Image (cartoon, rainbow, N blue to C red):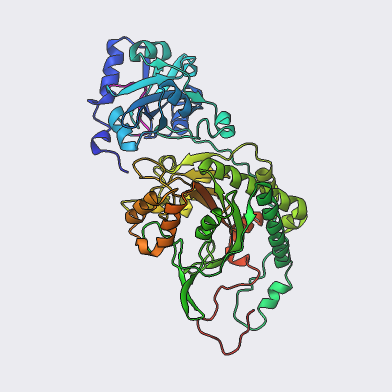
Amino acid sequence: MAPPSELLDLNDDTGVCGRILELLETEGARFRLLHHAPEGRTDVASRLRGHPLNQAAKCIVVRVKITKRSSRYVLAVVPGDRLVDLEGIRRLYEGKDVSFAQRDTAEELAGAVCGSITPFSFHPDLEAVVDPELLRQEEIFFNAARLDLSVALNSEDYLSIARPRIAAVALNATDAFTDHRRSPLNWSGNMTILDTTTTSSVKPAAVRPPNAWGNEPGEFLKALNSPWYKLVADLQDLIHRTTAEYATSRGLKALYLPLTVRTITCPTGLGSDSEPVPVTVNGVDTYLPDSNQFMLEYGMRLAPGGCYNIMPSFRGEEPDTTHLNQYSHSEAEIPGGIDELIDYVEGYVKALAGAALEAYGDRIAAAAGDTSHLSRMAEYKGHFPRITFEEAVSLLQGEEGCVRDEGTWRTLTRRGEHKLMEMVNEFMWVTHFDHLSVPFYQAFGDEEQRTAANADLFFGMGEVVGSGERHADAEQIRKALVMHQVPERDYAWYAEMKQEMPMQTSGFGMGLERFLMWVLNHDDIRDIPLVSRVGEDKKWPESVHRP
């Protein structure tokens, strides 16, 4: 979203910038002005100004929901090397819920574009709260409601002139990493970008795929004689065994489900990202499954402790380096919400990484050139970093080609996913996407029904796991169907099941080929399937040369 034009005039000091400078002059404050290249990111601006990050006043507008119908807004001011403690702010104001303010609201209340918000509030509906750690600094630095101008201000003078409330509203980054329920990782307004990615030198791989996609006679023999595919076969078996062991340890049951469905999870409505694959089987018009999610939700009524399976999925799209139109899909549905789901998925991928490293570490190193990525995942302490989609958009501000904006909804591009992993962590979650950007069955993430209670896990090539809460009852399903312009008749049984047997569940899907791409440090998913379906003849060939 572009900031209002009246906030972008860098030569106009009649707004918040002018008021602050006049106030500091009038009060005899000890301050300096610093001109620099336009910059709103806290860490970059701090380098331009030439001071340690902990002297930067990072300013973020937070919305605290007091009652069902009333909210108040807080200007949280914390050291530049800290994160805002959302849960601490909620408790401070005895609120029911807390979140970052919408960008347009934050800019209106602060009188400045995000990235230049100051630690002064001139709006009656915005109270400034400063963390005491910032006040330990003799001098603090902040953008002066302009991206190209900053102020270095004596902290005692700031306190006497601004008169903010003083309270502990900051978290160390390590605290946020180890306890995501206390305060999710957050970056907004003046942002600190953390990079916890560990890099390592990758040796040239000795084992490479033979490119066995062709239609020529005997092409498949390349795969059968290749050490690459022998390793892939062993890894597939390991994933199957580890998935069963992990799911059983968490109380889930394996369900065997049909390979045809009349309820698809990629309907031709808003939030769809692929086309279904229609087939006729024994004279019955139906579809091949693009996911077993609906069937697993059905299964939850028979196995309420949770259920899972690994089955083929089919999508009507041409394969490329990161997509297949036939792939193996590991899916599960569990009782509970997004926190329980994230906990399950993190435990699952860590178990898979650890098992692969233990069983085939040397062979993986020969194919991938390195196994440190497996170690980092398997040994990762605590939860992976977690940010909301809105925070992701703020992080990516100014980065071209990272956010796709369709007017009524937005989503991240593959470039955006990669950029976020560079900025945040090699393993990270993005939650609460725009609801119209995801399929209708994802539960609403807020009362205004703008966001979804979904979560995508990024690592390797980008999104590897897609997950989310489901609508618990028929009323919410019907609202979502209308929003996404999907006819209810196509999902009549699904709505009826929710009507008669409401249940709060959450589920995920992970393409095993994408996971194996990451394990093998490979850049083309078409080299992963044991039997290729890439480039097949559209019509029945005269002679069948491919298995």
Q: Is residue 424 above or below residue 123?
A: below
Q: Quadrant of the rendered structure where residue 209 is?
A: bottom right
Tell me what residue is drawn at x 41 percent, y 60 percent.
Answer: 272
Residue 414 pos. (x, y %): 48, 54
Residue 338 pos. (x, y %): 51, 43
Residue range of the region highlighted in magenta in the rendering: 114-122
Residue 190 placement, left or right of 376 = left
Q: Is residue 516 magenta?
A: no
Q: Is residue 119 magenta?
A: yes
Q: Is residue 465 visible?
A: no
Relative depth, front residue between 262 and 423 = 262
Q: Quadrant of the rendered structure where residue 23 is?
A: top left
Q: Is residue 252 above or below residue 100?
A: below
- Toward the bottom, the furthest residue is 542
Q: Is residue 448 visible?
A: yes
Relative depth, front residue between 255 and 314 = 255
Q: Is residue 321 above or below residue 476?
A: below
Q: Main secondary structure of the magenta part?
A: loop
Placement of the N terminus among the 4 image quadrants: top left
Residue 83 pos. (x, y %): 49, 29
Q: Quadrant of the rendered structure where residue 497 is?
A: bottom left
